[in-house]
Image (cartoon, rainbow, N blue to C red):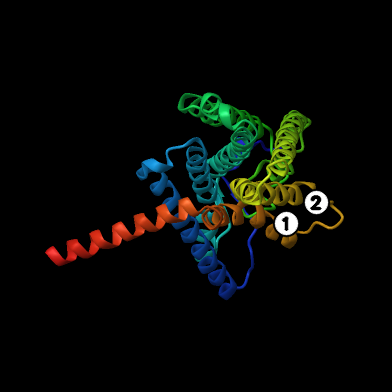
């Protein structure tokens, strides 16, 4: 029996063995990655530079974009490199870093989406108390709590997972390292500790899900009591982007982790893992930009300013 310290590298699941398809996957993922970098980068820069967007809603959106960049940067560059160089290998420390960072960014994103549902609830159900309940200090504390708690959570899970003896080889049944796939390599009863921790995490995640659902039930009840149709439309528009992002995040994660073993397969697992780990970070900027006219105007203003600055610099040169 060998333990995890004797394993120097892991073998990730390949998308295909055909060289042409490997290159196709590389270019496809490169396009998705660049789109995620551009979209989230534009949102971060726009919110940071435009003082009109220095409000709680956009502060949380800036944090969400940072987490999206972090999560997609944890998995996709290594997958692209493996497709480009026709390899499956990832070092032991690289695998541990992926487990930690992916767990951290995904958990922090879910926590932040929960906080954002509270922001929408206060904005619509308690608008007169919005400035008091969600002042700049309160927003900073909530964001810091979301980041800090999940940092310890991810650190605990990673340390516990890689302290277990792994004696079922080093082939990970996924295109990136994640805890459930690492647990499959363990043949020690110590893996039950991690299963217990995952169970506690699932309960906490379910609690956040219930909080989001209850918040939106209250929001919809408040919106339906608004007398004017224009007011109802404005209130729904404020929440629709966040609700779309939450729905996509939760639905893809549920498909990935609650899929019955009877219908699961490596190829289906790859598709589902892409749905919850790659697609949301790339689509979130598009969802928020399409539903938010103020953000679209600010992004267009930033792009126009950058374009004219570039023209002027070239003209003066």
Identify which residue is drawn at 58% across, 43% down: 102
Outermost residue to the bottom: 20
Image position of 114 with respect to 172: above or below: above
Is 270 in front, or is 192? 270
Give the x, y percent position of residue 166.
69, 39
Tell me the tag on residue 17: none
Characterize the local packing of mark 1: few (<14), some (14-19) or many (20 or more) Cα atoms within 10 angstroms: some
Disc 2 crowd rating (10 Å Cα; few below 14, some 14-19, many 20+) is few
Q: Give the quadrant of residue 17.
A: bottom right
For label 2, the SS is loop
Image x and y of residue 308, in percent: 25, 62
Q: Check residue 259 in the rendering and tell me which mark sits there, or answer none.
A: 2
Q: Between residues 312 and 161, which one lies in front from this camera angle?
A: 312
Of the residues under marks 1 and 2, which one precedes in the sequence?
A: 2
Residue to which mark 1 is pinned: 269
Is label 1 or label 2 in front? 2
Circle 1/circle 2 CB separation < 8 Å: yes
Question: Is residue 171 visible to us here?
Answer: no
Q: Is residue 90 left or right of residue 299?
A: right
Q: Nearer the viewer, residue 280 or 186?
A: 280
Q: Left or right: where does residue 281 sit relative to residue 244?
A: left
Position of 189 with respect to 147 (left or right) is right
Above or below, 250 against 287 in this view is above
Q: Nearer the viewer, residue 65 or 14?
A: 65
Q: Which residue in the rendered view is the most extreme toward the left?
A: 317
* Residue 238 % position (x, y): 59, 46
Quarter of the figure with the C terminus: bottom left
Q: Look at 51% across and 28% down and name the residue there.
A: 131
Q: Position of residue 86 (x, y in %)?
A: 54, 65
The answer to whether residue 106 shows anywhere in this view is yes
């Amino acid at each position: 029996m060998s333990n995890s310290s004797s394993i120097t590298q892991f073998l990730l699941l390949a998308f295909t063995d055909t060289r042409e398809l490997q290159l196709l996957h590389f270019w496809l993922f490169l396009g998705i990655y660049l789109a995620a970098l551009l979209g989230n980068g534009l949102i971060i820069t726009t919110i940071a530079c435009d003082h009109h967007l220095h409000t709680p809603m956009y502060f949380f959106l800036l944090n969400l974009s940072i987490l999206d960049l972090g999560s997609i940067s944890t998995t996709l560059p290594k997958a692209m490199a493996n497709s480009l160089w026709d390899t499956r290998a990832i070092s032991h420390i690289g695998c541990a870093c992926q487990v930690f960072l992916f767990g951290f960014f995904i958990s922090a994103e879910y926590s932040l989406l929960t906080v954002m549902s509270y922001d929408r609830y206060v904005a619509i159900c308690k608008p007169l108390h919005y400035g008091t309940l969600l002042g700049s200090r309160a927003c900073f504390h909530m964001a810091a709590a979301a980041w800090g708690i999940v940092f310890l959570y991810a650190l605990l899970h990673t340390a516990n997972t890689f302290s277990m003896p792994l004696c079922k080889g080093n082939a990970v049944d996924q295109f990136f390292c994640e805890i459930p796939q690492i647990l499959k390599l363990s043949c020690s009863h110590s893996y039950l500790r991690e299963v217990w921790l995952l169970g506690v995490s699932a309960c906490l995640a379910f609690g956040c899900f219930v909080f989001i659902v209850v918040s939106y039930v209250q929001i919809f009840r408040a919106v339906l009591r608004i007398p004017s149709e224009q007011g109802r439309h404005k209130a729904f528009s404020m929440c629709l982007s966040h609700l779309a992002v939450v729905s996509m995040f939760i639905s893809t994660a549920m498909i990935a982790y609650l899929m019955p073993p009877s219908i699961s397969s490596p190829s289906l697992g790859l598709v589902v893992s892409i749905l919850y780990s790659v697609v949301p970070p790339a689509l979130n900027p598009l969802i928020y930009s399409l539903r938010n006219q103020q953000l679209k105007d600010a992004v267009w203003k930033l792009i126009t300013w950058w374009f004219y600055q570039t023209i002027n610099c070239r003209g003066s040169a």
